[in-house]
Image (cartoon, rainbow, N blue to C red):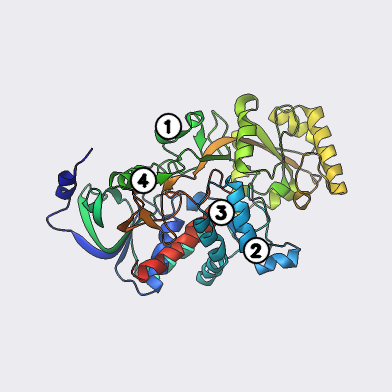
């Protein structure tokens, strides 16, 4: 391990740049932090993105944003920040930090309005995204999470924020390895040059989780070694998390790793018919349902991993397919070409194409539709998520399990300041988003990650502007 003298030696004799704030990562967390700080008067903000393009995993996320919203009453839905917090804590087996959870749920609605004020548009109907446990999910109007990236990157540039791509951070520099203030960082630019950046106010780490790092994730959950991932394979690689640990950051919940439906083993294209559980059912190769489709994500993970070939199928009708966002509709159409999705005028024909037992699938859908009519599903799906599968053509798509989200990460306080192993703030260092731990507990509710990155990103900008 590097000793204090070696850590001190890392400090450059001369800094190449001096700014007020340097942000690692251009996903939703990084862009929200930059915009929030800049609009409150913080100057000289630099965002460093290691890839050649912006957005990280936010750009490819479903994009559902969870928050209690007065509009829910128009749909007959009762909700509140308190109930949202209660479900978040219970859904994570009470392993989340109540202070962080309450900070999230009580500030999420203001963040939603803030995003709308910047130009992000949401669909009018509030739904329940896969694994959300309650209809409080706000879907972007156009396509996936890329809406957020487009709007906030444009806003950041208007506010004078510098965004630099192909800038890979290789070190976070502290006065001493385990003490003192974080002074800045070192990155390598696209020409291979090492650049040292002094950050007078803060370094903000928003690099995402470790879902694409096979060795790191399987260290904490060996079942996950051979699974595919829904993450950008170059984004969630974990090196910035290790850098923060090297200068003393504590971590929590590293074995809490979430999977979502994605590519089964051996497949490459991820089709998406699962995001809105009211629009689909899941079956195995035997054509039978095996779990309520609006269950917790960890329960869905374990149920699918227990199936033959660790593979399920989403079944929906053409109306359900039309309710997927534009990006997912395109993915599903591509799946028809690659053999990852199927479409047919009858359920029997659909089953034969996909390799599902035809008689059982027909019987399953008939029983499900009867349950929809009665308002009671024998499979356990909640009444508000029941909608008949009846409009041809019918669709099926693979739903294996892919590593999706890592709930563990560095310990933070409600101002997103990173905490060390002695419970003390590491001055000058903030962290936002999936690189942090303690918010989602053992199981993240669907739609809470988008709320997390933008809410805590906005609050981090406020905290930095206030001198924290």
Which part of the image, by quadrant, shows the N terminus?
A: top left
Disc number for residue 219 = 1
**Marks 3 and 2, how far apart at CA:** 15 Å
Relative placement, left or right, of 256 versus 80 is: left
Q: Is 379 placed left or right of 339 in the picture? A: right
Query: Which mark lies nearer to you, 3 or 2?
Result: 2
If you read the primary sequence from the N terminus, does the residue marked by circle 2 or circle 1 appear first?
2
35 or 68: nearer the viewer: 68
Q: Mark 2 or mark 3, which is nearer the start of the sequence?
A: 2
Going 87% across and 43% down the picture, which residue do you hit? 370
Q: Report which residue position mark 3 lands on.
A: 448
Tell me where residue 200 appears, x and y as whole percent: 25, 65
Element under label 1?
helix
Residue at the location (50% across, 62% down)? Answer: 455
Image location (x, y in percent) of residue 155: 43, 68
Q: Secondary structure at mark 2?
A: loop
Q: Nearer the viewer, mark 2 or mark 1?
A: 2
Q: Which residue is mark 2?
A: 80
Residue for badge 4: 241
Relative to 141, residue 131 above or below? above
Q: Could you tell whether 105 is left or right of 255 in the image? A: right
Mark 3 crowdedness (10 Å alpha carbons): few <14, some 14-19, many ≥20: many
- The answer for how far apart the CA atoms under marks 1 and 3 are is 25 Å
> Farthest top residue?
308
Total residue callouts: 4
- For residue 89, above or below residue 357: below
In whole angstroms, how far apart are the C-alphas of marks 3 and 4? 21 Å
If you read the primary sequence from the N terminus, does the residue marked by circle 3 or circle 4 appear first?
4
Near mark 1 (Cα within 10 A), the count class, few <14, some 14-19 or many ≥20, is few
């Amino acid at each position: 391990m590097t000793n204090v003298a070696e850590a001190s030696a890392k400090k450059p004799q001369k800094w190449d740049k001096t700014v007020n704030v340097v942000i690692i990562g251009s996903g939703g967390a990084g862009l929200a932090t930059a915009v929030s700080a800049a609009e409150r008067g913080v100057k000289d903000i630099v965002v460093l993105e290691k890839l050649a393009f912006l957005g990280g995993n936010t750009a490819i996320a479903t994009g559902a944003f969870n928050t209690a919203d007065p509009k829910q009453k128009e749909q007959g839905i009762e909700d509140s920040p308190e109930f949202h917090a209660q479900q978040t804590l219970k859904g994570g087996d009470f392993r989340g930090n109540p202070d962080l959870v309450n900070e999230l749920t009580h500030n999420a609605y203001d963040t939603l309005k803030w995003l709308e004020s910047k130009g992000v548009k949401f669909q009018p109907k509030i739904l329940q995204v896969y694994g959300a446990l309650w209809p409080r999910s706000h879907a972007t109007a156009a396509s996936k999470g890329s809406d957020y990236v487009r709007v906030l990157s444009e806003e950041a540039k208007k506010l004078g924020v510098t965004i630099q791509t192909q800038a890979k951070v290789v070190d976070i520099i502290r006065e001493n390895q385990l003490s003192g203030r974080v002074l800045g960082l070192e990155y390598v630019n696209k020409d291979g040059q090492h650049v040292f950046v002094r950050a007078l106010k803060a370094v903000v780490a928003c690099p995402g989780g470790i879902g694409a790092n096979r060795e790191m994730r399987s260290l904490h959950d060996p079942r996950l070694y051979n699974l595919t991932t829904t993450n950008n394979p170059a984004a969630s690689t974990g090196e910035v998390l290790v850098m923060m640990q090297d200068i003393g950051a504590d971590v929590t919940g590293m074995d809490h790793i979430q999977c979502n439906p994605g590519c089964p083993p051996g497949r490459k294209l991820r089709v998406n018919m699962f995001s809105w559980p009211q629009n689909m059912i899941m079956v195995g190769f035997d054509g039978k349902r095996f779990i309520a489709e609006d269950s917790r994500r960890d329960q869905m993970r374990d149920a699918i991993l227990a199936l033959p070939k660790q593979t399920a199928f989403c079944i929906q009708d053409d109306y359900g397919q039309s309710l997927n966002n534009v990006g997912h509709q395109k993915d599903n159409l591509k799946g028809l070409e690659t053999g990852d999705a199927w479409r047919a005028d009858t359920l029997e024909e659909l089953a034969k194409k996909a390799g599902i037992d035809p008689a059982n699938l027909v019987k399953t859908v008939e029983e499900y539709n009867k349950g929809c009519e009665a308002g009671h599903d024998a499979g356990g799906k909640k009444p508000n998520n029941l909608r008949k599968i009846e409009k041809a053509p019918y669709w099926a798509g693979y739903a294996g399990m892919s590593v999706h989200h890592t709930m563990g990460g560095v310990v933070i306080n409600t101002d997103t300041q990173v905490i060390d192993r002695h419970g003390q703030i590491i001055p000058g260092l903030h962290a936002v988003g999936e690189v942090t731990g303690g918010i989602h507990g053992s199981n993240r509710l669907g739609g809470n990650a988008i709320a997390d990155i933008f809410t805590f990103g906005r609050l981090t900008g406020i905290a930095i502007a206030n001198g924290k």
